[in-house]
Image: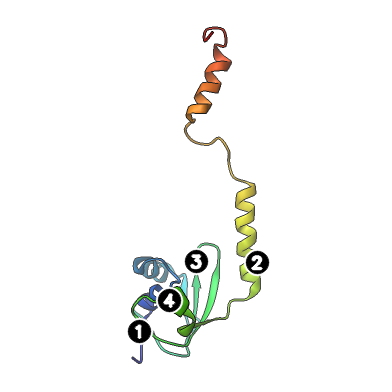
Amino acid sequence: MEHARLDKWLWAVRIYKTRSDAAEACRGSAVRLNETIAKPSAKVRIGNTVVARTRALTRTLHVTGLTEKRVGAALVPDFLEDKTPESEYEKAREKQANARVFSHKGSGRPTKKDRRDIEKLIAPDELD
């Protein structure tokens, strides 16, 4: 095999969970192949550099092998070399930690316990 479709390769090496996610990322300009924005049908060859942006992380990958079939997580290093700077991983960890700190408690529909607590506040004498 001398080349593979970009969306299939990104899915096969587990950068994106589904092939349609990989294709959508390509169409949304979140994937670059050798410094240029790539279409899902772009041909990936050994030696190419792929920059793929996922939710909180921009990964830089060097293609060392080609496949269009999904591989197990243990086999992924046979097909790519991760050149992502450590600062990118640190930024992603920081975003995740901040999301936990600033989560909104009490948003959405009240739980059964919340309802019971509200009823106690409104009419504490009527329940006895």
Kind of residue indicated by mark 1? Ala
**Helix or strand or loop: what does disc 2 sit on?**
helix
Q: Nearer the viewer, mark 4 or mark 2?
A: 4
Where residue 114 sits in the image (x, y, percent)? 53, 27
**Distance (Cα) linking label 3 and label 2:** 15 Å
Residue at 41 percent of width and 66 percent of height: 17
Q: Local crowd at mark 3 within 10 Å, few (<14), some, or many (≥20)?
A: some
Instruction: Determine which quarter of the picture holds residue 15.
Output: bottom left
Which label belongs to residue 54? Answer: 3
Do the numbered discs 1 and 3 sit on residues whose CB atoms are within 8 Å? no
Q: Local crowd at mark 4 within 10 Å, few (<14), some, or many (≥20)?
A: many
Dot 4 or dot 1, earlier in sequence: 1
Where residue 126 sits in the image (x, y, percent)? 52, 7
Dot 1 or dot 2, earlier in sequence: 1
Which label belongs to residue 90? Answer: 2
**Distance (Cα) linking label 1 and label 2:** 31 Å
Left or right, 4 with reference to 90: left
Residue with the mark numbered 1 = 4
Q: Considering only vertical position in the picture, is 58 above or below 105?
A: below
| Quadrant of the image containing the C terminus | top right
